[in-house]
Image (cartoon, rainbow, N blue to C red):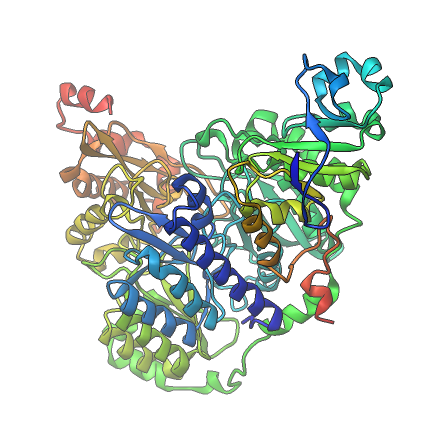
Amino acid sequence: MYRYDHFDQIIVNERVQQFRDQTRRFLAGELTDDEFRPLRLRNGLYIQRYAPMLRVAVPYGLLRSDQMRMLAYIARRYDRNYGHFSTRQNIQYNWPRLEDVPDILAHLASVQMHSIQTSGNCVRNITADHLAGVATDEIEDPRPYCEIMRQWSTFHPEFNWLPRKFKIGVSGALADRAAVQWHDIGLYLVRNDQGEVGFKVLVGGGMGRMPMVAVVIREFLEKKYLFSYLEAILRIYNLEGRRDNIHRARIKVLVKSLGAEKFREKVEAEWLRTRDRLILDEKEVERVKAFFTPPAYDRSAVDDKTLERHIAADPAFATWVKRNTRAHRVSGYRVAFVSLKPPGVAPGDITSEQLDAVADMADRYSFGQVRSTHDQNLLFADVHQAHLYALWNDLKRHNLATPNIGTLTDMICCPGLDFCSLANASSISIAKQINDRFTDLDYLYDLGEIQLKMSGCMNACGHHHAGHIGILGVDKDGVEFYQIQLGGSPGNDAAEGERIGPSLGKGEVATAIARILDVFVEQRDGDELFVDCVRRIGIEPFKARVYAGVESKKVRAYAHN
Amino acid sequence: MRIIDKQLQMVDDDWEIADEDADLSAHADVIVSAAHWQKERDALSTRAGRLGLKIGGDTPLEGIAPDLDRFALVALEFSKFSDGRCFSQARLLREKYGYGGELRAVGDVVRDTIDFMRRCGIDSFALRPDKDAEDALRAFKELSVRYQTAVDGAVPVYRQRR
């Protein structure tokens, strides 16, 4: 993976100094709350319900073991022994002290990390397919472009004060595992009729109050025009995006109000003017690509016979291999997930001990690297199949081997009311309720892949719009209620789920999910996926079951929620 | 007006932002609004002293582009320091419309935004009056390496790496 050179290091070091001085000025009263807020946000620092929250960037989800150890150290020294992986593949600390943050940033800089632009109305951490470089269905590895875009977007002088936050997601594979179409700009690496690889550019995706799936504004963009095209989009947005209403300020609103075609015309006109001035530097692309060459794989890995033996001898291991590992493009290697969704743990949470343990496992089994996924798990991308059994045993010892990847309990969940000052309702407690209810793994396996995603408010950090089952927490006069929607998707078939009806009380969510799953089991056609079933039969059968027995008066009362 | 100038010095200069009903004969160098200019272009064109134009983030540049050479200065008004439109306005004025006069940031201009303003082609800064100028000047020394080029012609890191 990418390693900083002298210049990259200067930039993060100077940023630490800059933020140290900003913090000092704030504490000395030279900056007001309103003046300091956007500055600290540009360093990922929020003031939350109980304490500040610091969001550390994990660029396109890649981490080295020494970085993991630093994350563990920070959790121990400055936080309460844990961190939380977010849907932008970043890690968040919930309990740092404002006064300590400059020191934390200095620690991060010492291992080539930072929290630059992890919040604020600017280009955020760029996310990517977590299987980049090892996926079997990849057209081209997106990571070099992600790194080049990371550098381009860092302290971009023109686009640091956009109308609203700006997220870019990239995939180079056929299957979209990065929720690309839910981004302000989505990029797919694609091959055209001439066999050249370029970018398909989508714009205007986003969740929140007005969920929208991105629209394609250019089917094929030559790579050399990547930045001129991105800058044209951002310039139009920066000038014309709404700034009078925070809820109408994302680029999706501009795209919708102008219409995709009109927006495209404006972008293309601006791009035609500028495209020859900002050509992607080929030498730089080659330099960065050299950081993403394949590691030294053991070409005889495929001859290993021990994996088969362990699978035959140990059913629990066999289950884990089946559920938590994926195919690798090199025979004899597997991708192994680290489940951060064991029962009783808030999804995405990880302790400092686990961070250290994962770092050790990365060194032992996966070339010293680990990745975070947008659905709040970790993974080892390059595990020799002969090492899987030992890895599994290590993971088990640290409660990281729950074999639930891709199942109902592998849910995305925002921090919710337990931590977040925006939240209307608790989400972690609902995750627990669902975990407590669905303990039978065999039942979950029979259900097949189900993506459950849950947010504690309309801001949709838990991606509920894109869930096969989406849960949204709402507040009604200080009481928490939950809306359920079905049929959403983050993938190639991206869609917003459809709300099934009035919101439910806090105690009723797991029961409602159980009823929904009953309908699925009854109506399922063979091995049909849950989301396909919902799309085939519509939401009515699910709705009827969930609200069966609920008095009409009560439904009416709910309906006001 | 007290400003940070192109050489990053604190200086007083003669520019004044004029209200539409102000007596312009009392001033040498005046900055007028786009609306004022449209209404009284003849009178403004014939007066002695230099003329500046004040625009905001929402001023369409196509409308003023033909007249740009009449203005020795264009003042970009930042209504709030977090309103980033004038960063793009500045780049467009320099790179699309080829404006070579002085670009001045006015309005909510503070230490933590002026470095990027400068990178976008703004070359003088009328700081918000309550802000300390010596302190603000430090902004230009905070970041010494640039990942991208802009109007400032900074040599981006990727070219320094060769």
Going by the picture, which residue comes out furthest to the front? B26
Q: Residue at 36% of width from left, 44% of height from top?
A: A467
Q: Would residue B54 be found to the left or right of residue A302 on screen?
A: right
Q: Residue at 74% of width from left, 72% of height from top?
A: B162
**Residue A14: image location, x then y, percent:** 54, 63
**Residue A332: image location, x then y, percent:** 46, 79
Q: Would residue A132 be found to the left or right of residue A350 on screen?
A: right
| Placement of the C terminus of chain A among the 4 image quadrants | top left
Asked which quadrant contains residue A556, the reply is top left
Q: Would residue B70 be found to the left or right of residue A105 on screen?
A: right
Quick check: A57 above or below A415? below
Quick check: B96 above or below A224? above
Labels in figure, total: 0
**Quick one: A99 or A436, which is closer to the camera?**
A99
Q: Residue at 36% of width from left, 82% of height from top?
A: A307
**Quick one: B36 or A349, which is closer to the camera?**
B36
**Quick one: B162 or A298, which is closer to the camera?**
B162
Q: Would residue A12 be found to the left or right of residue A344 on screen?
A: right
Work out whether residue A554 can be spotted: yes
Quick check: A531 above or below A125? above
Asked which quadrant contains residue A81, the reply is bottom left
Work out whether residue A406 can be spotted: no
**Residue B155: image location, x then y, percent:** 73, 60
**Residue A435: image location, x then y, percent:** 19, 53
**Quick one: A260 or A414, which is closer to the camera?**
A414
Asked which quadrant contains residue A259, the reply is top right
| Placement of the N terminus of chain A among the 4 image quadrants | bottom right
Going by the picture, which residue comes out furthest to the right? B46
